[in-house]
Amino acid sequence: MQSNILRIIPLGGLGEVGRNMMVYEYDGEILVVDAGLMFPENDMLGIDYIIPDLTYLTQHRSQVRGIVITHGHEDHIGAIHHLLNEVQAPIFATPLTRGLLEVKLGRNGLGAKADLRTVQAGETVEIGPFKVEFYHVCHSIPDGVGLGIHTPAGLIVHSGDYKFDHTPVDGKPSDYNRLAGYSQQGVLALLADSTNAERPGWTPSEKVVEAAFENVFSKAPGRIIIASFASLISRMQQVANAAERHNRKLAFVGSSMIDNMKMARKLGYLEIPDTLLVPIDQALNMPDDQVVIMCTGSQGEPTSILGRLSTGTNRLFDIEAGDTVVLSSHPIPGNEENVYRVVNRLFQQGADVIYESIAPVHVSGHASQEEMKLLLHLTRPRYFIPIHGELRQLKRHARLAQEIGIAAENIQVIENGQIIEFVDGEMRISDERTPAQYVFVDGSGVGDVDPEVMREREALSRDGVVMVNLTMSREFNAVVYEPEIVTRGFILPREGDELLNNARREIIQSASRANGNVRRVVEDRVREFIYGETRRRPMVFVNINRAI
Amino acid sequence: MQSNILRIIPLGGLGEVGRNMMVYEYDGEILVVDAGLMFPENDMLGIDYIIPDLTYLTQHRSQVRGIVITHGHEDHIGAIHHLLNEVQAPIFATPLTRGLLEVKLGRNGLGAKADLRTVQAGETVEIGPFKVEFYHVCHSIPDGVGLGIHTPAGLIVHSGDYKFDHTPVDGKPSDYNRLAGYSQQGVLALLADSTNAERPGWTPSEKVVEAAFENVFSKAPGRIIIASFASLISRMQQVANAAERHNRKLAFVGSSMIDNMKMARKLGYLEIPDTLLVPIDQALNMPDDQVVIMCTGSQGEPTSILGRLSTGTNRLFDIEAGDTVVLSSHPIPGNEENVYRVVNRLFQQGADVIYESIAPVHVSGHASQEEMKLLLHLTRPRYFIPIHGELRQLKRHARLAQEIGIAAENIQVIENGQIIEFVDGEMRISDERTPAQYVFVDGSGVGDVDPEVMREREALSRDGVVMVNLTMSREFNAVVYEPEIVTRGFILPREGDELLNNARREIIQSASRANGNVRRVVEDRVREFIYGETRRRPMVFVNINRAI
């Protein structure tokens, strides 16, 4: 490979939501930024989550010098244990991000194996030929960073997830000075978060949520139950602040949320006085108007605490009339149905429910259009590569960059697996591509479910399965016993009785008249018969036993 | 049953999106308003659509005096053929709605059977004890009506789907005078559309779309392809107008859209000069900048024309660089993923794509909060019942009504199957309930798939199916041949080889050691083994043949 080339290889996050992973390579030495997972779409049946395709890193494992994690959200850290199974390299992260990594690695039995190194925003770390400078950014989790990556080929700014919040919960705005400083040094390329590229204006400050909570707390007649993400540390702080102001005690429910809360308190990212916290058992025995409960389930997950509360199947407590439930979150695309189903059911259980379309109890953690333009103006990059978003968002982000004066030929919208090269300060797209398929994680299996298996699941889910056991004479094509038919997901037994009786007749006839492959003949006949009667196409399997 | 009671029985549309159907009953005589379908949610696997539970109407079929359809959208007419299979009664509709009903009934072989009667907005029809007055409303389809239902118990206003558009495409605003007139007569109860109850302000006029189209048409360098609903007649008019202004010819693609277009032209609801229309074959041979193509697929349906264009599998033509594709629609809740997938793929195919979050190429057909308040003020009802919406929307609508001064005890949020009674001018909820379950239509089956069958489909979709054929000795529990294992939707064959070999060993062992029900023992062992190895739970079926 030619030296003096800086290569940027996106293994995830481009053209999709989640599984962020970017590879920077210079002179054969590799820096990995982020190792995220992606949540399955509604038609990815049975899949737990999706990770980046690690083929390239596995093939070049000895060249990986370090892994940098920009912040502690699942779409940036969720595949870390899969990555560490393939690659051994030190992981650099700020304290809170490191804490979240430790929790995650501990759960996956890799706690001891990982070489974790703490960095602070403002510090620079040498990783192979890369000098990586961490600068503070606001996001919906504290301790997020963007990266100034100084390479022999030039300076790359990698934004991470960011917004320009002037009144963030932790009081630390994004590091404008550092960003402006980069433009003075000359930025070869900016790679920036495109999530909200379709959103005009400026993302509201986290401060807005404080006012909305104030309103909820001052009106709620009974218990307040607030659902959010387990990693939304700043939201925990806001809930704690509101609880304190309104003389309510705060209880957390759910192990992931409790783990993160404890860790964030220990590291000083969450300031909750001991006197404010009560265990859930105690909270449930206090007067309703003196309690706030914080839990997970804001994405409508049926097995979460909020999901179980909505169906009246929660173990510890139920919704009562007078409860106020707050969903402090935005539905992840594809989760809308689940979220609103939970909202409707909570209303049915008698709660008053407050959610994003009723009151601003959530704001986005990502920059909107005007902030994107500001980042471009602050850094004044020669080249611009939108990252972190669906193709429509990357395209929109590219258009914004054009609108503020970056030449179209200096902007590149690429897909996962496409390779960008910088040679002598010029950007080009390599002819080479690297594998960047969806890698499905299902149970303990990684990559053993592919689109073909998914199509089978899809077919099964649509019309179910019909299994026929047929015993035939050893010598002749004569059916000896009444054929046994078992169905699942096809038709209600009481409705299917007559249909299956008629199917048995068809089976016996077609089997006895079959020339050649009896199994195939009977299967075809059963499919045809069922489709004619029901307009459905279940998967049909016939098994033939030969009797004496 | 006590006489002098007016009963209102919602069989659909309350607590859900779609399948609108309301039953009004007085002195044992029944009026049905609307007969809509509901589109399946993402987890209603294999379901084509959902219709109202017709049990009540089937039980009282001889008492049904008439069916009134408020407008021609699927969620109001889509179950009409199912209803006519149970009930014989005249159907009253305005001309365009009648036209759409005829198209639909014709497709379902009921064209001749139906007793269709045309009414015009402004007319009153006597249906049993009900005097039903039709008044014009604006909606995203022309010829929509609301109903003033004069009953011996008092006047009921049934809004239908409406908005207060001051500049509608057809120039006919909603009938404010009629509505204000009702308040002078005294309105016992208002039943009103709650779809946009969470939306502050006033829904933009259809006029806004015209300006957005103007912008698209003046900039598009090549072909313009506009996708929308097949029934969105007013959008067709707007596209035709823009095409005419910009000297482009217009071609329609897709049989449902073409059928509706022809019918609407014939009835005078669509004014398109003959010279503007070209067949698609001709359009494809014209210069790109002289063509507009209108098609279906704006909900991201994979088998629609737009869906096929996005994957490059359309029969007649492909997307080319320079094409501008407009999605003139709003994703139906639950369809967001499909819609955005199509958008991303169209970008990938080289098109420029314009959709709701980029430009106002669509507006809602439903009233927002300020319009809802206006309707309440215009009609000044004694009682208010929010209809047509999820529970969260009904609740929000109820709250709006309270905010403008209707007493909480005069507002009733009810669910499908709950019965409202008016006796001596007082509203009460009956203790009686009528069945109002989801009735699933799957292929030609109606109601033969229930939540249990759905759970089986869900299980199959999650981890697939494993089928084992085992031949055992007639006398002993000895396995004679190597067990045959067939899987679908479980694991990739190349990944599963070793697993299935080990499974065979487990099967042989457990079968030969089994006491009692060998099938059950082996099935349990296979499930346990597979879960231990893969953390997956496929459906497992074992079939045992006894050899000689």
Image (cartoon, coloured by chain):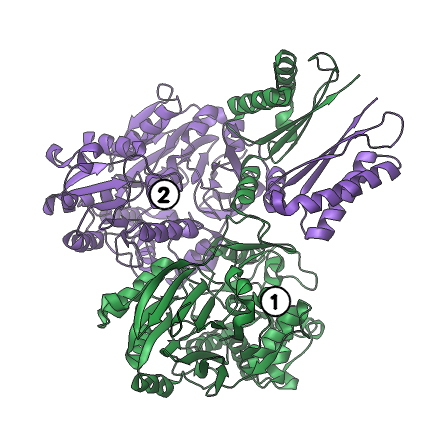
Chain colours: A green, B purple
Give the residue at x 45% y 86%: A171
| Chain of the residue on which disc 1 is drawn | A
In the image, taking residue B329 as reference, residue A330 lies left or right, namely: right
- Residue that mark 1 sits on: A81
Image: A116 above or below A356: below
Residue B433 coordinates in the image, percent (x, y): 57, 41
Q: Amino acid at mark 2?
A: Gly
In the image, taking residue B287 as reference, residue B458 lies left or right, namely: right
Indicate the quadrant containing the N terminus of chain A: top left, top right, bottom left or bottom right: bottom left
**Which dot, 2 or 1, sits closer to the camera?**
1
| Chain of the residue on which disc 2 is drawn | B
Residue A324 seen in the current view: yes
Question: How many numbered badges does the structure rendering display?
Answer: 2
Give the residue at x 56% y 80%: A96
Residue B113, by quadrant, is top left
Viewer-proximal residue among A416 and B177:
A416
- Residue that mark 2 sits on: B307
Q: Secondary structure at mark 1?
A: helix
In the image, taking residue A541 as reference, residue A214 lies left or right, namely: left
Q: Residues within 10 Å of mark 2 (few under 14, many from 20)?
A: many
User: In the image as oriented, which residue stretches furthest toward the front?
Assistant: A2
- Residue B519 is tagged as none
